[in-house]
Amino acid sequence: MFKEAREKAVAMTKVNIEPEFEITQNVNNINQQPRSPAQIEFGKYLIHTWYSSPFPQEYARLGKLFLCEFCLKYTKSRIVLERHLDKCNWRHPPGTEIYRNNDLSVFEGFHLVGYFSKEKHCQQKYNVSCIMTMPQYQKQGYGRFLIDFSYLLSKEEGQPGTPEKPLSDLGRVSYHAYWKSIIFEYLDNHRDRDFNIEELSKNTGVHPQDIAEMMQLMGMIQPWKRDADEGGCGLAVIVDWPLVDSYLERIKTKPRIKIDPEALRWTPLISNYVNPFKIQSQDEADDADDENDLNKIDVDDLDDDVDVKIRPKPITSWDNFPSASRDSVKLPPHKSARSRRYRYSGRRGRVGRPPKK
């Protein structure tokens, strides 16, 4: 009887429920081994998974899992999910909203588009540990927005950031495209100036080493022989301006979400250093100097005739008393714990002293 019930339950959970949209991806470079689960129903989307996840055995053997798109709870069937939705009070992803601009919100920790995580205390100064965009929202500019947002937090922290290494295959493609775009846009805005990696790092929050490595991959950094007076060899930046112009024309047709730094509502966890990415105005600097001057006390301005009253140190033991005055000192009566009266209400309503433990 138990076996029949279990087989019936398995058959019910494998019912083919067709959602409104089906997400399919061309993932020829991904291993074609069986994945568990093979499909995930997330809201109105049916997502074919790319990798396996270590779900419990009772969930891993299922061909499809049903997820709540608000609290991310996973269930075995749509019936269980519907019962959960009747009780779930969430209408947005869990976390605190730290950024809002027009119809786009970012929660720290409406519909889940993607996420990225970072360590609060990282010795390697990584600004991203893991980054992901849901398959149904890819190719819409959200991945670049998350990368751009991570570098915005790095600028707020006052230090250039870099993603955790080594990068995955998809992460390498995404970050190389992002680094390439900021380098070409910087060159386009500074055509009449020399290329400065440090200035580009301050404007974007990208680590200088990542900028230099990307320029080397694009063939922009090449060795050159110095003059006979200087001797030796150096490095030169070679810019292919037709390539830059064609790239900038091509990206105009791609969707891009511009980030507004003024809409950020977030404070770094530790901010005991000067932020080099924030330029302080002259008025703010003068106000800070005036406030510091008010907190300072000039010793020369003190009046020499000021009377200073020094209170005697309180006596804490009999050793500090003179022997003749010990008898004349009257201390307040000491109340021990036994002399205090307690009132308590026990199980029988008695009033008196508390029971001994």
Image: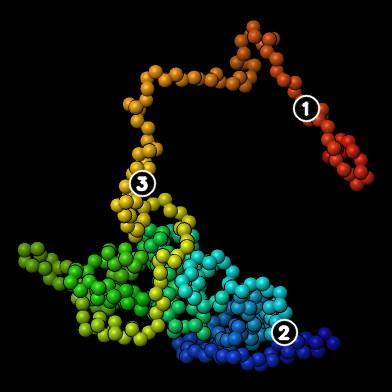
Is 320 or 188 nearer to us in this picture? 188
* Nearer to us: label 3 or label 2: 3
Q: Gap in Å between the C-alphas at discs 3 and 2?
A: 62 Å
Q: Is residue 234 left or right of residue 136?
A: left
Residue drawn at x 44%, y 66% as measured from the top left = 263
Q: Which residue matches tag 3?
A: 288
Q: Is residue 186 left or right of residue 35?
A: left
- Above or below residue 200? Residue 28 is below
Decide which of tag 3 and tag 2 comes sooner along the chain: 2
Residue drawn at x 56%, y 20% as measured from the top left = 313
Is there any visible trace of residue 282 in the rendered image?
Answer: yes
Residue 345, percent from left and from top: 87, 43
Residue 149, percent from left and from top: 43, 69
Q: Secondary structure at mark 3?
A: helix
Q: Of the residues shown, which amino acid type is indicated by label 2?
A: Ile
Q: Give the residue furthest to the right.
A: 348
Q: Secondary structure at mark 1?
A: loop
Q: Gap in Å between the C-alphas at discs 3 and 1?
A: 55 Å
**Quarter of the figure with residue 125:** bottom left
Q: Secondary structure at mark 2?
A: helix
Q: Give the residue furthest to the left.
A: 229
* Mark 1–mark 2 CB contact (< 8 Å): no
- Above or below residue 40? Residue 228 is above
Q: Is residue 152 left or right of residue 192?
A: right
Q: Which residue matches tag 2?
A: 79
Residue 264, label in figure: none
Residue drawn at x 6%, y 63% as measured from the top left = 229
